[in-house]
Image (tube, rainbow, N blue to C red):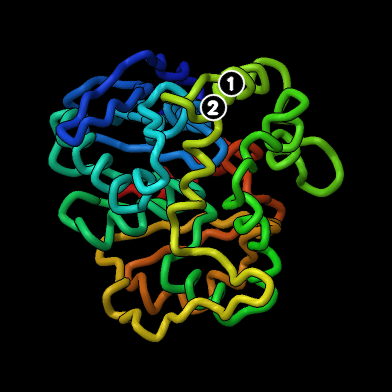
Amino acid sequence: MENAMTAPAVIRHLQFASLPNGTRLHYASAGERGKPLMLFVHGFPEFWFEWEAQLAEFGHTYFAVAPDLRGFNLSSKPEAVEAYRPRHIVEDLVQFVSALGYEHCVVVAHDWGGAICWNLAIQFPQLVEQLVIINSPHPYVFAKALATDPQQQAASAYMNWLRRPGSEEVLAANNFAMLESMLTASGEQPAPWFSGETREKYLAAWALPGEGASHSLSGGVNYYRASPMHPPGPGEPPPDISRLDPAAFVVRVPTLVIWGERDRALPKSLLDGLEQFVPDMRLERIPDGTHWVVHEQPELVNRLIRGALK
């Protein structure tokens, strides 16, 4: 383990990988290429900077890399909604690991990044040495909750709002006021972490233009539009999960799940029955953590990750 007094590893960004599928991913990194790869995958509405504290910590012992997913910050932002289907994002990550010169890695992921990386671990277990998921529900458990649990349907109603045409313009209005409220509303108080330089970096990332005629936020919002995962809208039947085979969703890599239990959109009930799908699982609950626990308690998150690494 690193000495507590070790200086943070130096973070380098403005690095790019051009993938065989035509996607160009921007990434930040810490540590030396050649050390074991540790991949950090952000969610919405974030970018690589979500993982600043983790890069600074794990860059001592890993080649720690945090890409901007397609649609975010400095990475490619294709216009078509279909370009954001989960299989394309999974393909980006598979090709990205290869472009970095690696065959496998430790994967740490949050929110939409977690949704993608559950799928990555299920489909490409040989690529994922270990999986760390932070506040991101397992796909079968989430699909079942969206279909059958009224509490989860209500908590996820925002997804249907984000899928509507023009939601990105509303999110961006008044200098991204609504988007900022999504990040800061842990209770009634603005989040202390979202201030000063951090806030400025997020506003700058959100303001970067899309490609073609697309809005700066269209890429991120298109993750919701392209996904089959959303609660039924008014008058709609719930999604039919009868054709999903639970056995096809088993994760066969060692997995650490970290969960801030005050997540209002993703309640801790999503952990119920998770061990059925993740046989080699360690679960760490953070009772006072919200959806943004990576920012709120970075030292604790780092300690939990460090303690689970093989």
Residue 146 marker = none
Crowd around label 1: few <14 · some 14–19 · many ≥20 (10 Å): some
Indicate the position of residue 301 as horizontal and vertical percent values. Answer: 53, 43
Which residue is nearer to you in this view: 141 or 295? Answer: 141
Residue ID at (42%, 66%): 139
Residue that label 1 marks: 207
Pick the residue in front: 243 or 49. 243
Q: Are the residues flagged by discs 2 and 1 in contact, CB closer than 8 Å?
A: yes
The residue where tag 2 is placed is 216
Q: Is residue 104 left or right of residue 177?
A: left
**Residue 201: x, y in percent?**
59, 18
Q: Compared with residue 63, is residue 283 higher up or lower down, i.e. above or below?
A: below
Q: Secondary structure at mark 2?
A: loop
Mark 2, Cα crowd under 10 Å, few <14 / some 14-19 / many 20+, is many
Q: Quadrant of residue 145?
A: bottom right
Classify residue 234 by image quadrant: bottom right
Mark 1 is on which residue type? Ala
> Could you tell me which secondary element the residue under label 1 belongs to?
helix
Looking at numbered disc 2 in the image, what kind of residue is underneath it?
A: Ser
Q: Is residue 145 above or below residue 222?
A: below
Distance from disc 2 to disc 1, alpha carbons, whole Å, reads 6 Å
Toward the bottom, the furthest residue is 242
Q: Is residue 109 above or below residue 76?
A: below
